[in-house]
Amino acid sequence: MISTIQLNNLIVEVTRKKMKNIRLRIYPNGQVKVSAPLKMKHEIIHDFLASKLVWIQQTQTKLQQRETQKQHVDNKSCYVWGKRYLLNVIEQDTRPHITLADNEMRLYVRADTTQEFRQAIIDELVTRRIKTRHSAAN
């Protein structure tokens, strides 16, 4: 059974399960979920969340800052196969691609490229290199 509880501007998803203790989870996207015993009263869950509200908000802030730091910006270190590369994002109106030279990774993308797409390009490079090494070894 799934329901929601609202505290100030925070909406918490509550799932009732066959369990003994209440469990609070905060996901990287900031979503808050609680699993609670089937027979636990709604007021008890609400009071529990109210007592944890400051901690929840602090944790959400930390997670948001961590996600922001993961975004790819110039002069950030990226690790590929255990080797450190200094990321240099070059915005051009060309097809997205990456070059690796010495200790520098150059990521060529269009100016309107999202952070998620930039990460996908880097992930694709790693996957492609692994497949190339694997096929060369066989």
Image (tube, rainbow, N blue to C red):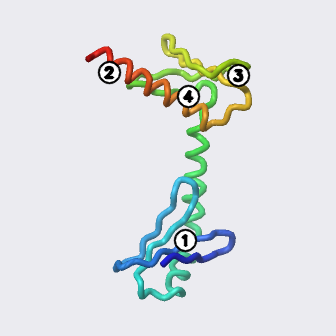
Q: Earlier in the sequence, mark 1 or mark 4?
A: 1
Q: Nearer the viewer, residue 131 or 32?
A: 131
- Residue 44 coordinates in the image, percent (x, y): 50, 85
Establish if 66 lies above or below 73: below
Residue at 57% x, 54% y: name it. 29
| Residue 16: quadrant of the picture | bottom left
Q: Is label 3 or label 2 in front?
A: 2
Residue denoted by label 1: 13
Q: Earlier in the sequence, mark 3 or mark 4?
A: 3
Pointer 1 and pointer 4: residues touching (CB < 8 Å)?
no
Label at residue 134: 2
Mark 4 or mark 2: name the one nearer the start of the chain: 4
SS for dot 4: helix
Query: Is there a contact, CB below 8 Å, between mark 1 and mark 3?
Result: no
Identify which amino acid the numbered label 3 is placed on: Glu
Q: CA distance from mark 1 to mark 4?
A: 34 Å
Rendered position, 130 above or below 54: above
The residue indicated by pointer 4 is 121
Real-space CA distance between mark 4 and mark 2, rounded to the nearest whole angstrom: 20 Å
Circle on res. 91? 3
Q: CA distance from mark 1 to mark 2?
A: 44 Å
Q: Indicate which disc, 3 or 2, sits on the residue closer to the N terminus.
A: 3
Q: Of the two numbered discs 1 and 3 on the same chain, state the one appearing first in sequence.
A: 1
| Total tally of numbered discs in the picture | 4
